[in-house]
Amino acid sequence: MTKLETLDNLVKICVDSAERYRRAAADVGKEKLVQFFTQQEAARRRDADELNLERKRLGGEGEKVGKESGSVGGFIDRTAMDLSVVMSKGDTGVVEWCREDATDVIAAYEKALRDVDGTTRSTLERQLAENRASLAALEKVLQPYGHPRS
């Protein structure tokens, strides 16, 4: 994969993740969870914006980063999350969906690091560290609301 393709993919992943957090904030009932998910949404959107700047720096065109962008798979996953809430998995189910998303995002960043170097690599390493910290924070948030369902 070229650097630009790698960045394109990560932009979509970040937008999907941001949208998942936005939906999660709307689907939970506890204010502490709403705040956490809203913060995570903003962080993922910042990541997508930063990746787009890196894309432009490398000579690519900027990607559209909005609620309507992202991947088809991300849209399907968010719809499934909404249905899960409707089927009453509640706050714990939403937190678990977001935990799984965070794990998938981290894996995507780890894979992407194989295709980049220089400034791009530094950006991805920093964002990966932030995503790992978010996952750790999510694990802490999960504790008072129950643990993942088996």
Image (tube, rainbow, N blue to C red):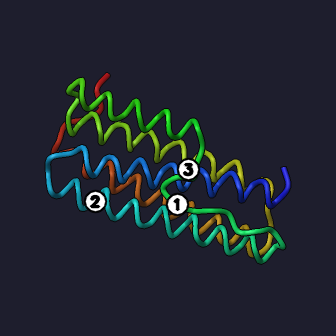
Sequence-wise, which precedes: disc 2 or disc 3? 2
Numbered tag placed on residue 32 in the rendering = none
- Secondary element type, mark 3: helix
Question: The disc labelled 1 sits on which kind of residue?
Answer: Gly
Q: How many marks?
A: 3
Residue pictured at 80% horizontal, 55% vertical: 115
Numbered tag placed on residue 106 in the rendering = 3
Q: Is residue 31 above or below residue 81?
A: below
Quadrant of the image containing the C terminus: top left
Q: Is residue 34 above or below residue 81?
A: below
Sequence-wise, which precedes: disc 2 or disc 1? 2
Question: The disc labelled 2 sits on which kind of residue?
Answer: Phe
Q: Horizontal and vertical percent for residue 55? A: 74, 69
Numbered tag placed on residue 36 in the rendering = 2
Q: Horizontal and vertical percent for residue 23? A: 34, 47
Q: Nearer the viewer, mark 2 or mark 3?
A: 2
Q: Horizontal and vertical percent for residue 75? A: 50, 39
Q: Is residue 72 left or right of residue 141?
A: right
Distance Cα–Cα, label 2 vs label 1: 20 Å
Q: To which residue does mark 1 refer?
A: 66
Q: Nearer the viewer, residue 131 or 85?
A: 85
Distance Cα–Cα, label 2 vs label 3: 18 Å
Sequence-wise, which precedes: disc 1 or disc 3? 1
10 Å neighbourhood of mark 3: few (<14), some, or many (≥20)?
some
